[in-house]
Amino acid sequence: MLDLPSDLPADIVPLSWLLGVWEGTGVIDYAVPGPDGGEGHRFQGEFAHRVSFSHDGGPFLNYAATGTFTPEGGEPVALVAESGFWRLSRPADAQDAGPALLPPREGRDAARTVDDVETLRLAEGGFPIEVSIAHSDGTLELYLGRIDGPRIDIATDAIVRAAGAKEYGAASRMYGLVDGHLLWAWDIAALGADLGSHASARLAKV
């Protein structure tokens, strides 16, 4: 059974260990092929990363992330910024707002409870989640996956790119809480390369 913090909506309790601002450093290492399969380029180096998870009373977490890469002997370069929402996967009902600015068709007589959330638990353990992320370069991601205690595994179900955005075909991410730190790893298929590890980081709560 879930332990429900008194100040959180029941739907975000499984995600509550993410709440806060996390900062730290990580490593980028990703090779892409060159034109016509010729010699390509390898992106390598360390970066600074800042991630924020917050909530405003709704059944979701607000997410934002920024990063800065400093090439050897060069000036810091801002990386693509992200913003989005993390939530448990469940069917919307008449008591939920949306789509767009449409209000609920029915008022909710009582807030959702721990028991309501427990009905979403998977047979193999944990809860299904969905994560929607917008990138500052015009890319949009929808991830589906699972949160099981202090571990999250998600993979893209859909990616939408603006006409001018760089080629980006698929991704998966893993997050874990280890010794009070947020560890994450991000695999991508981009710029002609197959799905593979491209970045990871270790962040501390600030």
Image: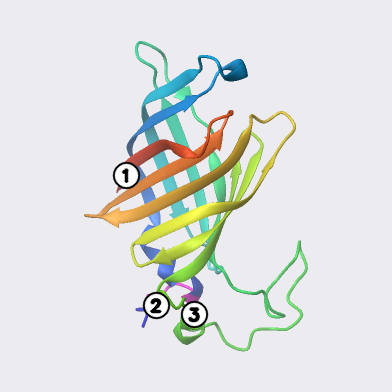
First along the sequence among labels 3 and 1:
3
Q: Position of residue 165 (x, y in %)?
A: 67, 31
Q: Residue at x 41, y 71 (%)?
A: 126
- The residue identified by callout 2 is 6
Checking the image for residue 52, the label placed there is none
Q: Tell whether position 63 is magenta.
A: no
Q: Residue at x 33, y 48 (%)?
A: 183
Q: Is residue 111 above or below residue 79?
A: below
Checking the image for residue 117, the label placed there is 3
Q: Residue at x 53, y 44 (%)?
A: 171
Q: Position of residue 97 (x, y in %)?
A: 70, 71
Q: Amino acid at mark 1?
A: Leu
Look at the image and give the residue range highlighted in magenta: 4-10
- The residue identified by callout 1 is 203
First along the sequence among labels 3 and 2:
2
Q: Could you say which is closer to the camera, residue 33 or residue 104?
A: 33
